[in-house]
Amino acid sequence: MPELPEVETIARGVHARLGGDRILEAWFGSHREPLKTPATRQARGLEGRTVRAVRRSGKHIVFDLSSPAGGGVLEERSGKAAAQWIVHLGMTGRLLVTTPDAPVAPHTHARLTLASGRELRFVDPRRFGRLEFRDLARGEGFSGPGAEPLIIEKGDFAKLFRGRRVAIKAALLNQALLSGVGNIYADESLFRAGIRPRKAAGRLTAAELERLRLALREVLLHAIRLGGSSVSDYVDADGVRGFFQLEHCVYQRGGEPCRTCGTLIRRVVVGGRSTHYCPHCQK
DNA sequence: CATTTCACCTGGTGGC
DNA sequence: TGCCACCAGGTGAAAT
């Protein structure tokens, strides 16, 4: 369900509520798909640690955790996390902060009991989401392979697409190039940059590439300001819907008139994903 | 290696 | 009402 702006909104919400809290107990359901780390090892890893920060990396939510003891002055000073809990929401994953007595929704795959008396739950009907524990004592911290679209600069952005024959739409969705862009914001940024989604990535001019980088940046920042897009039942950690769906120019608007020129928005399939564009505004 | 296709899941919607 | 086809914010493995 979530792309960069939704994940950013959720991470901020969870950080505000759980930052500084301590994990007392972790429970995992019987479905194996969501567990990149086996249930027992994941629970043992999480229990006793303090949540120092919750942040977004690409489409992943990263929980920076203290040592099991709870940190200590040395660790406080160093500012380094001792372990991480990595959550990917897939298409339908949600993180909910509740009280332990709140009814447990169907498809709840994880429940973390916290020292504050609250509970963090991971709910995911389709089970495309993933939960992973990383001990940083041995091994590296999480970092996606792709560049952050909000940070990348002109030259590096252009370099990503050089020589590529894939459609620019497919390239935008490739997380190894850019991390965080999904189907909504790929379509919306291409519309705002005036570029056809099927145009070969390596064929974009320098001007087009820079228009695309800036359009992507603007659309993501604007969406974060509005709390993300609520296409079906997406809600943030506080159960609040986003409002960016009201600003969609093309996404899921096939057959409707373009907001700029009135031409009917077209829906096609690119790289196996439904793709929406205005044949008049996008060249 | 780059690119394309498909499987992985459940649930909602709309047509007949 | 029931049944079925199709669609959905994502990814990663297998095939080409």
Image (cartoon, coloured by chain):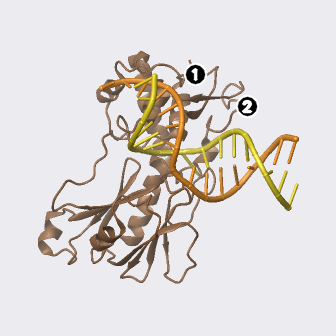
Chain colours: A brown, B orange, C yellow
Depth check, mark 1 against mark 2: the one in front is 2
Residue drawn at point x = 39 percent, y = 61 percent: A35
Residue drawn at point x = 50 percent, y = 35 percent: A186
Foreground: A70 or A136?
A: A136
Write down the chain letter for disc 2. Answer: A
Residue A177 x, y percent position in the rendering: 35, 34
Q: Earlier in the sequence, mark 1 or mark 2?
A: 2
Q: Amino acid at mark 2?
A: Gly
In the rendered view, does A237 fall on the left or right side of B13? left
Residue A113 x, y percent position in the rendering: 40, 79
Do badges 1 and 2 share one subunit? yes
Q: Amino acid at mark 1?
A: Gln
In the rendered view, does C1 fall on the left or right side of A127? right
Q: Quadrant of residue A21?
A: bottom left
Other-residue count near label 2 (Cα within 10 Å), few / some / many at <14 / 14–19 / ≥20? some
Residue drawn at point x = 58 percent, y = 78 percent: A103
Q: Which mark is residue A282?
A: 1
Residue A107 x, y percent position in the rendering: 55, 66
